Structure formats: C-alpha cells, structure tokens
C-alpha cells in the first residue's frame, strides 16, 4: 500500500514523502495513529501545500538565523568563571551563562536555542 507520511518516521522517511508499506502495517499501526494518509489526488494536494508552507517557514528561519549570525560575528564577550590549579575550570560554561553575556551586549536569546 502506498501512503503519504504526515510526520517524520525514522525508518520510512520524512513528512510528505510517498512510501510503500505493507498493508497490515498501514491498516493496523500507521493509519489509526494518524501518521499517514492514503494516496489520493486530494491528499497529495493537501500534503504538497503543507510541504510548501514548511519549506517557506524553514527558509525564513534560516534567513533570520544568518542575519543574527552576521551580527554575532562582530561581538566578543568574556565569561568569568572560577578556575583551580593549572587553569582547570570548575564546572562548565552553560548556555545560560552565554545568554547572560550576550544580553549584556544587547542580544536576547532563549537559552534552549
């Protein structure tokens, strides 16, 4: 049976791909969990529209990230941390420390990013 993936599934493919799977796997697992659509002209159009939106969103996010990267190239910040003998660092420099240092330079980031 040919199906259209709604979500990324590791061994099958990415969202929007048309893949061939065994009938039982599709009927008993993928379709009830709404991970796939059956291949029909209408479903192909819907998935194509979703794919185009996702591609557009990814392009916009990439452009924003490149913009921020250009601004960050000019920034230098120092994060003071306690050290021991032989200049060995106690603990680690975390993303939270980096966000705080960049906030002092005028940038605001979520520490998870």
Image (cartoon, rainbow, N blue to C red):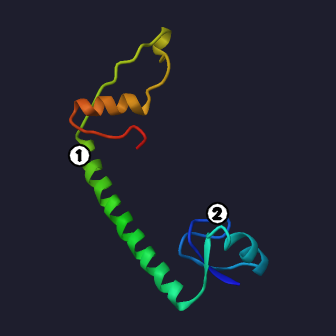
How many residues crowd mark 2 within 10 Å: few (<14), some (14–19), many (20+)? Answer: few
Q: Residue at x 60, y 86 (%)?
A: 39
Spot occupied by residue 42 in the image (x, y as percentages of width and height): 51, 88
Spot occupied by residue 67 in the image (x, y as percentages of width and height): 26, 53
Left/right of residue 68 with respect to residue 97 in the rendered view: left
Task: Name the secondary structure under disc 2.
Answer: loop
Q: Residue at x 52, y 85 (%)?
A: 44
Between marks 1 and 2 in the image, the one whose residue lies nearer the viewer: 2
Spot occupied by residue 98 in the image (x, y as percentages of width and height): 36, 31
Which residue was labeled with disc 2?
A: 10
Spot occupied by residue 28 in the image (x, y as percentages of width and height): 75, 72
Which residue was labeled with disc 1?
A: 71
Q: 94 or 25, which lies in front?
A: 25
| C-alpha span from label 1 to label 2 | 36 Å
**Residue extending furthest toward the right:** 24
How many residues crowd mark 1 within 10 Å: few (<14), some (14–19), many (20+)? Answer: few
First in sequence: mark 1 vs mark 2: 2
Left/right of residue 76 with respect to residue 93 in the rendered view: left
The label shown at residue 19 is none
* Residue 57 figure quarter: bottom left
- State which quarter of the image contains the N terminus: bottom right
Left/right of residue 106 with respect to residue 18 in the rendered view: left
Q: 82 or 13, which lies in front?
A: 13
**Residue extending furthest toward the front:** 32
């Amino acid at each position: 049976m040919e199906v259209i993936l709604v979500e990324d599934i590791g061994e099958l493919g990415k969202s929007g791909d048309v893949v061939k799977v065994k009938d039982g796997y599709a009927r008993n697992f993928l379709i009830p969990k709404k991970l796939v659509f059956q291949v029909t002209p209408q479903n192909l159009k819907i998935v194509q529209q979703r794919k185009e939106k996702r591609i557009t969103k990814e392009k916009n996010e990439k452009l924003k990230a490149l913009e921020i990267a250009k601004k960050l190239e000019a920034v230098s910040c120092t994060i003071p941390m306690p050290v021991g003998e032989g200049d060995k660092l106690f603990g680690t420099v975390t993303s939270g420390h980096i966000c705080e240092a960049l906030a002092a330079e005028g940038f605001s980031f979520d520490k998870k990013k």
